């Protein structure tokens, strides 16, 4: 009897895992079943665009796994209404297509250098067709619980086409590929909760941003200056009355200047009763704020995981990081649980394939993990080097290339058979090193384009083709 494998999530990570596991030598003998669960009606993960975000909002504040969550409208019925994506209407990638793509699966020539979210969704769905037929792709399946019982994983799911039934299945190993852009992080700042209670529609998160039309004639405050904050600010100048951005550190795109966006420091106080004002740590005050958009990232949260959540060696902790992971992959106390694409500042598609090739070989038994003591020692060294919280998962510069190449050492001797990812050679690594520079130049062009739309009083639409400012 072969192993029973569950993969949770039909985005790039889950599909890469499914492909690698399905291509293992003698996979049909080694695995009795490989099931991939996806809660939408098609693959795509976070690239599955859900345009109607009016029926969902985040709890405010949302700082830990315990006090975070989403508030659903009673009328949110379909999977697209219940499980909204952070994708917004006019969105393109931050990564050039040639460095973003899966191995031996180039993006279409007609795609521009920075493809649209819709093009990437189509590309991912095409990639899914390369997965071997011995993997079962199960759609409209919402995971209710995942629990370790009697040395087996019990997975309970709800079929969204028949919500009266909850179905339980047993597995030997589980790959968590559900993504980590689902539970918004919103800081707890004095006055914010009162503001939210009085005017909940005026406090939101980048996950629920769709387009600029709701912000016409409004004064918008954006919290955060990374990629999403900068992109949303650029779009909003075309239709909002004013846009102000609050930053706590230098933006990775510091060369991109939006002349019509005001800049303030970290907000220390919100006061809806004092002319809807905020005051910064430096004492600066701005008022008449209509909407606050938090571009402050996400928590590491797995609501359906009922085992290994708390305690001294729990996986999720407060939500600032995942804990006790060997090579950012295998949960050391129970390596039958693995989690993909946890690190930040990475090139996700090739990164997922590098992780998948290692996971597949471990699951099939062609590669053995070190002892738990050895894995724990490596984890503790990594933790001491990087620190706790988000920093533990950060891979700045070309650290993701180096990480991926270390995984090739782990599969040495097995790389003649089965799925093999693409190695980060000197040429690829050099191109990866300049991605922020490439995107900065693109953003500078987009800002000029947005300023043109602003003068014409036209809402932002995606820039495609030639534009000469």
Image (cartoon, rainbow, N blue to C red):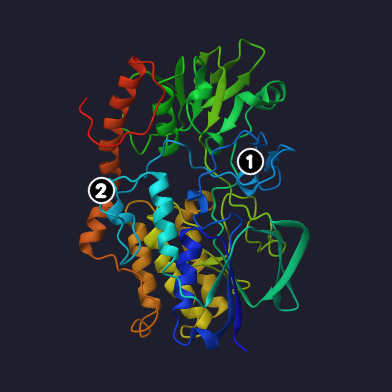
Q: Disc 2 on helix, strand or loop?
A: loop
Q: Position of residue 390 (x, y in %)?
A: 51, 49
Residue at image location 46% in from the left, 59% down from the top: 12
Q: Disc 1 on helix, strand or loop?
A: loop
Residue at image location 54% in from the left, 55% down from the top: 179
Q: Position of residue 338 (x, y in %)?
A: 56, 68
Nearer to the camera, 343 or 220: 220
Residue at image location 25% in from the left, 48% down from the top: 434
Query: Where 169 falls versus 283 (above or below)?
Result: below
Question: How many angstroms separate mark 2 from mark 1 (CA)?
Answer: 33 Å
Q: Choose top left, top right, bottom left or bottom right for residue 136.
A: bottom right
Nearer to the camera, 260 or 51: 51
Give neighbour class at mark 2: few <14, some 14-19, many 20+ (Cα, 10 Å).
few
Residue 236 shown left or right of residue 442 in the figure: right
Give neighbour class at mark 1: few <14, some 14-19, many 20+ (Cα, 10 Å).
many
**Quarter in which the C terminus is drawn:** top left
Nearer to the camera, 301 or 161: 161
Q: Choose top left, top right, bottom left or bottom right for residue 6.
A: bottom right
**Quarter in which the N terminus is drawn:** bottom right
N-terminal of the two: label 2 or label 1? 1
User: Outermost residue, right direction?
Assistant: 164
Q: Residue 422, can we see it? A: yes
Q: Which residue is mark 2?
A: 434
Q: Which residue is mark 1?
A: 63
Query: Where 240 falls versus 87 (above or below)?
Result: above
Residue 210 shown left or right of residue 274 in the figure: left
Q: Position of residue 173 (x, y in %)?
A: 61, 75
Query: Where 230 falls versus 411 (above or below)?
Result: above
């Amino acid at each position: 009897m072969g192993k029973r494998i569950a993969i949770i999530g039909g985005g790039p990570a889950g599909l890469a895992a499914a492909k690698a596991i399905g291509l293992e030598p003698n996979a049909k003998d080694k695995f009795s079943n490989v099931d991939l669960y996806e809660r939408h009606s098609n693959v795509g993960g976070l690239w599955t665009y859900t345009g109607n975000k009016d029926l969902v909002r985040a709890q405010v504040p949302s700082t830990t796994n315990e006090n975070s969550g989403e508030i659903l409208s009673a009328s949110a019925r379909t999977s697209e209404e219940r499980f909204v994506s952070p994708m917004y209407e006019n969105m393109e990638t931050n990564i050039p297509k040639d460095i973003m793509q899966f191995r031996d699966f180039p993006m279409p020539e007609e795609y521009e250098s920075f493809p649209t979210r819709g093009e990437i969704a189509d590309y991912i769905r095409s990639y899914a067709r390369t997965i071997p037929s011995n993997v079962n792709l199960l759609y409209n399946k919402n995971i209710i619980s995942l629990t370790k019982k009697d040395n087996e994983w019990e997975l309970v799911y709800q079929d969204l086409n028949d919500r009266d039934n909850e179905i339980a299945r047993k597995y030997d190993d589980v790959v968590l590929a559900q993504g980590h852009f689902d539970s918004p992080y919103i800081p707890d700042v004095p006055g914010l909760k009162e503001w939210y209670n009085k005017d909940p529609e005026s406090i939101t998160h980048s996950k629920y941003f769709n387009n600029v039309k709701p912000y016409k004639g409004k004064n918008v405050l954006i919290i955060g200056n990374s990629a999403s904050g900068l992109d949303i600010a650029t779009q909003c100048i075309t239709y909002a009355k004013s846009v102000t951005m609050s930053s706590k550190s230098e933006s990775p795109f510091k060369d991109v200047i939006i002349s019509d966006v005001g800049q303030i420091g970290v907000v220390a106080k919100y006061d809806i009763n004092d002319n809807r004002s905020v005051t910064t740590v430096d004492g600066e005050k701005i008022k008449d704020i209509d909407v606050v958009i938090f571009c402050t990232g996400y928590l590491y949260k797995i609501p359906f995981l009922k085992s290994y959540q708390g305690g001294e060696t729990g996986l999720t902790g407060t939500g600032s990081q995942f804990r006790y992971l060997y090579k950012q992959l295998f949960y050391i106390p129970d390596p039958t649980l693995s989690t993909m694409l946890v690190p930040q500042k990475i090139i996700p598609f090739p990164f997922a394939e590098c992780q998948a090739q290692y996971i597949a070989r471990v699951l099939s038994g062609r590669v053995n993990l070190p002892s738990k003591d050895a894995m724990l020692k490596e984890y503790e060294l990594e933790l001491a080097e990087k620190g706790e919280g988000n920093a533990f998962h950060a891979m700045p510069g070309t650290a993701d290339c180096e990480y991926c190449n270390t995984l090739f050492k782990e599969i040495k001797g097995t790389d003649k058979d089965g799925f093999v990812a693409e190695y980060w050679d000197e040429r690829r690594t050099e191109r990866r090193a300049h991605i922020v520079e490439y995107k900065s130049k693109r953003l500078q062009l987009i800002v000029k384009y947005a300023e043109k739309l602003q003068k014409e009083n036209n809402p932002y639409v995606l820039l495609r083709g030639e534009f000469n400012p």
